[in-house]
Image (tube, grey):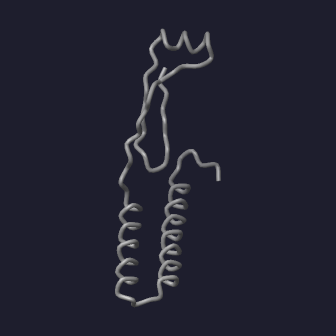
């Protein structure tokens, strides 16, 4: 038996459960897998957010735009990128029932 752990922005981790662990799971209803550390994926969304962040820091430092206005523009850009990425993921997902 294989347990697959998936989270957005992390690498997929698969754990193989041997027959003795499976028997323990069936008897006790629980199985301790120990500590599992998922490796983070660095995607295009990360780099876009980093570029927006650095750009906003420069805009605020150079006083080209009021800091509050710059912060609102930055969060709007981040939300737009996030929304576009989620829509793309839903469209590409073979398991999507939408």
- In the image, farthest residue toward the bottom: 64
Left or right: 73 as drawn, with respect to 44: right
Q: Residue at x 38, y 47 (%)?
A: 40
Q: Where is residue 29 in the image (x, y as percent from the top left)?
A: 62, 17
User: How far from the left and from the top, in percent, is residue 14?
Assistant: 43, 30
Residue at the location (41% across, 39% down)? Answer: 38
Q: Tag count in the figure?
A: 0
Most foreground residue, 7 or 61: 61
Give the side of residue 31 with respect to residue 37, left or right.
right
Q: Which residue is drawn at 54% across and 65% down?
A: 83
Front-most of residues 64 and 45: 64
In the image, 48: left or right of 79?
left
Residue 33, percent across and down?
A: 47, 24
| Residue 39 lies in quadrant | top left
Q: Is residue 70 above or below residue 87?
A: below
| Quadrant housing residue 61 | bottom left
Rendered residue at 51%/66% (across/down)? 84
* Above or below, comparing residue 21 to residue 88 in the picture: above
In the rendered image, residue 50, in percent from the top left (x then y), is placed at 37, 67
When the figure is inspected, residue 14 is found, relative to residue 49, above or below; the finding is: above
């Amino acid at each position: 038996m294989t347990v697959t752990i998936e989270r957005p922005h992390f690498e997929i981790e698969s754990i193989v459960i041997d027959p003795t662990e499976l028997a323990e799971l069936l008897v006790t209803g629980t199985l301790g897998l120990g500590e599992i550390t998922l490796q983070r994926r660095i995607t295009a969304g990360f780099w876009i957010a980093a570029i927006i962040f650095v750009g906003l820091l420069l805009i605020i430092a150079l006083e080209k735009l009021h800091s509050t206005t710059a912060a609102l523009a930055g969060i709007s850009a981040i939300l737009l990128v996030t929304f576009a990425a989620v829509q793309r993921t839903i469209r590409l997902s073979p398991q999507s029932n939408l």
